[in-house]
Image (tube, rainbow, N blue to C red):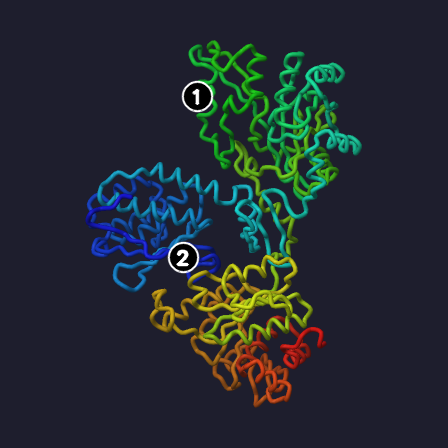
Amino acid sequence: MYRSPEFSIQFLRTTYLRGPNIWTYRPVLETWIDIGTLEDCPSNTLPGFVARLTAWLPGLQEHRCSVGEVGGFIQRLEEGTWPGHILEHVALELQSRAGMQTGFGKAREAGPRGIYKVVIRTRHPEVSQKAFSYGRDLILAAIADRHFDVGSAIADLTQMVDSLCIGPSTACIVDAAAELDIPHIRLNDGNLVQLGHGASQRRIWTAETDQTSAIAESISKDKDLTKTLLATCGVPVPQGQIVKSPAQAWEAALDIGLPVCVKPTDGNHARGVSLELTSQAEIESAYALALAEGSEVLVERHILGDEHRLLVVGGRVVAANKGEQAHVIGDGVSTIEQLIELQINSDPRRGEEEDFPLDTVRLDDHPTAVLELQRQGLLHNSVPSLGQQVLVMRTGNMAMDVTDLVHPDVAELVALAARVVGLDIAGVDLVVKDISKPLKAQGGAIVEVNAGPGLLMHLKPASGKARPVGEAIVRHLFNSDEAGRIQVVGLMGNGDTTGPAKLIAWLLHLKGLETGLACACGLFLGNRRLQKNSAMGWETAQRLLINRAVQAAVFETTARHLLTEGLPYDRCQIGLVTSMPKAEGLQDLFVHTDAQMPGFVRTQIDVVLPNGVAVLNAQDEQVAALASYCDGEVIFYAQNEANPILRSHRANEGKVVFARGNQVIWAQGKQETELFSLAATTTSKIIKIHQLSRNDLLAAASAAWALDISKDLIRAGVKSFGQSPTAH
């Protein structure tokens, strides 16, 4: 760690806010830092600091910052800004250079002199925490004019991104879902992701979904069985035979007719595939390569033309790529291995990582390439003559987008092939001379149908347009009017939300919905208590959203949980605030005055969906003022119908709930509906047994209106609250 003898930046606390929080809807990492004497040294007072910092991280030139234009952050550096703000931008830039795009960041004074809260958007907290650590060391090194190995730091972060974050194919589906306002939950350390909540969820595992049949996947792995089924349904496929020995491979080739290709029956990614073989030696050598990559070997008629990969999603072709062959041209001096490095691997589109559109070519990793060289009488250390063209690989990256050229006949046959195998998402490989013409007329054929196809080739083709394949998969899983959401009710207040939460959950249960409840007194599913202690923690509450049985969920949240974990859901149908929480007990979070609380609690209303409802206690002016943050409708409630906020809202045709004497009333404009009497014997008994206040009942009645629960069901629910289902 690099640290100036004069200055230091100390990390005090780091918090992973996994759900919507006081900063943003998205997960963030919040770190508290103490910059010590650097509080007296803004960036414009540190000699050479800005030049050294931007030389190490030139991408900072693109940061807009609060200025709102490219170069805005540099302008702030030159005018003078403090290390908290600088750390925000440096950590974001390091994440971006490592391949984890995020963008959002904030830095705010925490209160005590020299202490700041720095927040950055994260896709994985370990990566962001490391970015903060490297960012701190880099800043101190730039201040002290010391060496800092930026390349090593970025390489370390890149390795973390590759190993910890979801892959780019999965990420494109998740990002497409987010654009359509469909929530997601990562279910493991890999690429298993839930889209949507509860009973409305779907699951993906990269390019496989919960609609992908295990039988279909098994069929696709058996190349011979796949061909048999396709041929039965009239899909053109190459003639082929499974063989048990090199000698049988040669016999099969003679029977089929030369040239042939040899491949493993259950291989993938073109491993062990040798094409256009014409001699016994070539075929017997190819047999060994194929067997090394699979359990059986298949000899097929070689189809003239170029390889293509077409992506089928939900019965239609959504993308198509053409393969490339890899060649080098001799210079009379360099070996083939050297030419591969100079002419092929030097292409900036090639790399080892998954997000490069083209793979690096290494002869050690491609035995079929070695065989291809041998067929030309060459070895890896051979020196081709000047101008001599050498074919290195016949099968390579499907890197050239040709989606717009696909003939309708080809698209129809490819979609049929996916249906025959039974795959909802399939990568169909075919060989054809011209993809813009019908398949059969030119002797083309479908050679493979693959489950779980790679998507990156369509997202980052080496040439042509990128295709929105992530959106296609999401649209396949969800109808245009679906967002994978269940009814979610979120409550926040000053210790007075447990009663309303339980009553709202009861009413939803009576409505016929399998309802989950996470509150101060436990975790419930229907009338079953799954956990006795508080279930307001993020991880516990999330169990309801993962449960496929849950059709509605009610969540009670405190200000502390909001500040230390974030909300356990991304958006809600109903956001209910019963009273403004107090700052007391939150001093350890640098919350010292009640005046700070509305700025935090507004999050509960910020997350209400546009078609949702904010339910607010009009008797608390600070709570009522939160209405301006709601994207949806607002219902106010108060005990007195003369409440000025209620009267004003009602005058504007807004919905209000109040008590007139002992009668609870819904009202909108001049229309009124009497719900139930607070003085009724059964209601009074329920209030006493469950320690409910009049406000609790008004809050629950308001939420029930927002949830479209009928007045008769509300009356029955209030009378029966707390009884077991067997009593009805």
Measured from the top left, where is residue 660 in percent x and y?
Answer: 57, 88
**The one of 612 and 167 positioned closer to us in this rendering:** 167
Vertical position of residue 397 compared to residue 609: above or below: above
State the residue lying farthest toward the front: 532
* Residue drawn at 60 percent across, 32 percent down: 321
* Whole-percent x, y for residue 244 in the image: 71, 21
Above or below 480: residue 143: above
Question: Of helix, strand and loop, which one carries label 1?
Answer: helix
Please state which of residues 118 and 413 is positioned toward the viewer in this rendering.
118
Residue at the spot of label 1: 342
Q: CA distance from mark 1 to mark 2?
A: 47 Å
For the N terminus, which image quadrant? top left
Answer with left or right where residue 602 lies relative to residue 475: left
Q: Is residue 567 shown to the viewer in this render?
A: yes
Residue 451 position, x and y percent, is 65, 38
Q: Residues within 10 Å of mark 2 (few under 14, many from 20)?
A: some
- Classify residue 249 as left or right of residue 92: right
Q: Where does label 2 land, which residue? A: 15
Residues tagged 1 and 2 counted as in contact (Cβ below 8 A):
no
**Helix, strand or loop status at disc 2:** strand
Q: Earlier in the sequence, mark 1 or mark 2?
A: 2
Residue 214: image quadrant is: top right
Query: Foreground: 498 or 316?
Result: 498
Q: Nearer the viewer, mark 1 or mark 2?
A: 2
Instruction: Characterize the local packing of mark 1: few (<14), some (14-19) or many (20 or more) Cα atoms within 10 angstroms.
Output: few
Res. 572 image quadrant: bottom right
Image quarter where the C terminus lies is: bottom right
> How far across and down, in percent of the image, does residue 491 sit?
52, 70
Kind of residue at disc 1: Leu
Q: Identify residue type, mark 2.
A: Thr
